[in-house]
Image (spheres, rainbow, N blue to C red):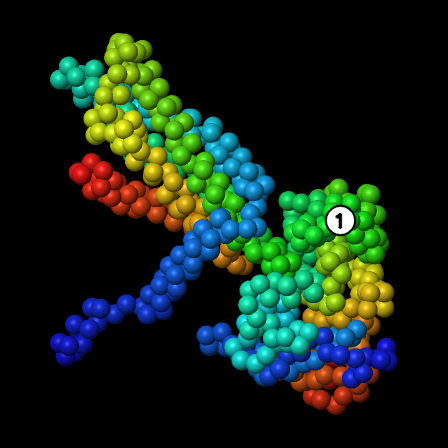
Amino acid sequence: MSEGVNGSGGVAAELRDVVLAFDDHTVLDDVSLKLFEGETLSVLGGSGAGKSTILRLVLGLLAPTAGEILVNGRDIGRASNAEVLAMRKEMGMVFQGAALFDSLSVDENVAFALREDGGFSEAEIEVRVREALEFVDLDAERVGPLLPAELSGGMQKRVGVARAIVDRPAMLLYDEPTSGLDPITTRTINELIRKLQTGLGVSSIVVTHDIKSAFRISHRVALLSAGKIVFIGTPEEMTASEHEYVGEFLR
Amino acid sequence: MPPSDTKRSLFIVPKGLLTRWALLTQEYFVLLWRTMAASVTRPLYVRDATVQMDVIGVGSIGIVVLTGLFTGMVLALQSAVEMKQFGATIYIGRLVGASTVRELGPVLTALMVAGRAGSGMAAELGAMRVTQQIDALETMGVDPIRKLVAPRYVACLLMLPILTIIMDVVAVFGGLLIATLKLGLTVDLYIRSVWVTLAETGFIFRYVPIDLFGGMLKPLVFGGVIAITSCFYGLRATGGTEGVGRATTRAVVASSILILATDYFVTQLLITFLVES
């Protein structure tokens, strides 16, 4: 899975010596990470290890206490508001609980970013929404008019993915994509993530504590413990690692 | 203990609490400022604002009418007891008119809207916050203040004066019911005494009684208070469903207190600048 990924391509996103601290506790302690173009990188770690904050930092929803977060070579932590909004359009985020707008139908949810953009005709939007829904294996005709509350958890998550890809972002961020799902749905979501790598060639960061899924979908995995990266490498390297915490985490 | 220490201990304020309050107040005014800016600059979410006007304005008419009716009736009833002793029941219109237009109309309307629509706003935004829908908006390049707070702010600002007028009219009508049916006054006498009391404090812009002007200025202020306070607590909700409940309670309590407090200051300003000058 790692062919043509490590080192050869450009860098989609990079964390450089990032420190994130609130009042008295440090969430991220000198974290450096690179996400190569077309790569899927999973960030593993126990609950409260600061995994999700990495996504918030990359999106510019949080500013780091120290260090730089480069997205396409530009520091999002120091960009102006307008620049941050523009940079976010290059990214799609899949939330843990899908975070669909519950007052809007599935169609309207997926179309949301396009409508906000203002540069698309209704006909274009309709085509794009159908494409996105079909990409995640949902029947646009049937599911489109439903409200999120009428969907199962797995379907909500797929709509969340459709909403994230409708604007054709270069990078996708997943927050615990498989948590709370049954094994079969977990497998379909994992397959979907792989389809997005190969089909759309997007770079992805997946934050998860699901080791099995991470190994299945990632080119590389990073392990976060107490705000520090204790391991980063391919799944094979991780299994072979003799690092004490890695062993403990995999066990 | 040396005296200096006892003296100092009197002034010990929990430092964390004070800083938290200062930060909270600052955040509140930052939200107010950003909402005001978002309400007058592009992109404007006009459709969202009309939806909110329907929810906040049209949706509140029922309770406003009921509150107004019973308030007007009870005002007339209570004052009749006192006034009968002096044979002054013909002044009931004055009492109902003055207290409704100056105070009860704006304040009761605002309190009812805070309880009904303010709680709704806080709950809705709170639920959106804890289910990460607010984060989702931001990741899609949409400013939640522009999309969610500004339409509610504008809707409150526009609807509260209208609701207050409805409350005033209904309350005066409620008073009329009691005055004519129970106390035997004529409709003409009652209405005239309502008008006399409104005209008493003088006019502004030639034709608008100052009392009525002040009575319309207040709901503008209260509308802003309700929208900003409710959205403020909604956006800050944390900790799941329980957090949403907490945010809603806080929003209603804080709105109500702020309405009563600002009412005092607005009244003082009106008296200073309009009545006394």
Quarter residue A233 falls in = bottom right
Please state the horizontal and vertical placement of residue B63, each as a whole percent of the image: 45, 30
Q: Residue at x 43, y 41 (%)?
A: B157
Report the amino acid beneath label 1: Ile
Answer left or right for B234 relative to B170: right
Q: Is residue A104 above or below residue B15?
A: above
Tell me the element at label 1. Answer: helix
Please state the horizontal and vertical placement of residue B129, each as a whole percent of the image: 56, 55
Q: Determine which residue is flagged by label 1.
A: A125
Label 1 marks a residue whose chain is A
Please state the horizontal and vertical placement of residue A166, each as a whole percent of the image: 75, 56
Q: Residue at x 37, y 59 (%)?
A: B25
In the image, A30 versus B203, the foreground residue is B203
Please state the horizontal and vertical placement of residue B49, each as a whole percent of the image: 54, 41
Q: Is residue B184 above or below residue A45?
A: above
Q: Is residue A121 above or below residue A177?
A: above
Answer left or right for A32 relative to B159: right
- Whether residue A216 is visible here, answered yes or no, is yes
In the image, B29 versus B24, the foreground residue is B29
Q: Residue at x 70, y 84 (%)?
A: A231
Q: Residue at x 70, y 65 (%)?
A: A90
